[in-house]
Amino acid sequence: MSDGLRLLRDKLCMDPSHFCRVCFEGRATEKGQNPPNVFRVGTGTHAKIFFIFDKPNRNDGNRAFVPIKICDPRFNSNSTQRNLLTLLDMLALVHPGFKPAHGVADQFDCDLVHITNAVKCDKSALTGEAGGIEVGGQQARTCISTFLHRELAIIQPKALVFFGEPPYRYVVGNRIDPWEVRSTPIDGRTYWVMRVPHTTATPFNSHGGKGAKYIEPFRRLLTCAGLA
């Protein structure tokens, strides 16, 4: 399983010169494309829960760190990363698998959780914009069918947690209320899914109660998915 995940990660981005360019090929934005963020390949290769964020924020100027991991501790330790670590600490009281195994240096490398982005590139292939923007529908669909569906097929989780509304819309294509837990088919498999506030400062602190409001919904998700 880990070999398949590594091959998929290398297909996504191997080094500063070798990375997926499918959505940018032949466009004026092609020369400005940044290498995409890769997912971790660690202890969570049998993870039962996917944490799915929308896309990278901005990779300009970070080629010294390529391949860049989602929530990469080597740079840009922002509120998204800090609050996610806080949340994992709090959720470890619900299930110990939310914390890294003893001796694992990567704080985001948990037995229970695989952390990824729905869309791996930081820029829109249509406009070249980066940062807090949404990519076009075709770019999202291409990335999800090429990478996320394959991640799901390799790891075979039972539950998916979407951080914010955009990744849920990109992957599932309809709407769901925050904190709702439901069974949903995706690419021929059925998963227990939930949408929660993003871990950026305002959603996490205001809608998420600085982590406190996530606890009971995660208990419900674990119970529904048979992971409690």
Image (tube, helix red, strand yellow):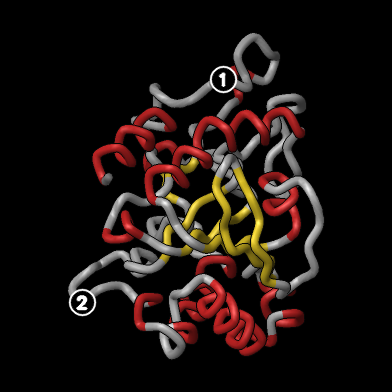
Question: Is 65 situated above or below 213?
Answer: above
In this rendered view, identify the residue nearer to me: 168 or 200.
168
User: How far apart, in angstroms, are the residues tagged by discs 2 and 1?
Assistant: 39 Å
Give the quadrant of residue 181. Answer: bottom right
Locate the C terminus and report the quarter of the image it occupies.
Answer: bottom left
Question: Is 114 situated above or below 130?
Answer: below
In this rendered view, identify the residue nearer to me: 21 or 131.
21
Residue occupied by mark 1: 22
**177 left or right of 49?**
right
Q: Residues within 10 Å of mark 1 (few under 14, many from 20)?
A: few
In the structure shown, which secondary structural element does the residue marked by tag 1 occupy? Answer: loop
Question: Where residue 129 sits in the image (x, y, percent)?
Answer: 73, 35
Question: Where residue 161 sits in the image (x, y, percent)?
Answer: 59, 64
Question: Is 129 situated above or below 152?
Answer: above
In the structure shown, which secondary structural element does the residue marked by tag 2 occupy? Answer: loop
Residue drawn at (80%, 68%) of the image: 177
Question: Where residue 216 sits in the image (x, y, percent)?
Answer: 61, 87
**43 left or right of 204?**
left
Residue drawn at (57%, 33%) of the image: 145
**26 left or right of 61?**
right
Question: Where residue 223 sits in the image (x, y, percent)?
Answer: 53, 80
Locate the N terminus and report the quarter of the image it occupies.
Answer: top left
Instruction: Please name the amino acid that badge 1 sits on.
Output: Val
Residue occupied by mark 2: 102
Instruction: Please name the amino acid that badge 2 sits on.
Output: His
Farthest left residue in view: 103
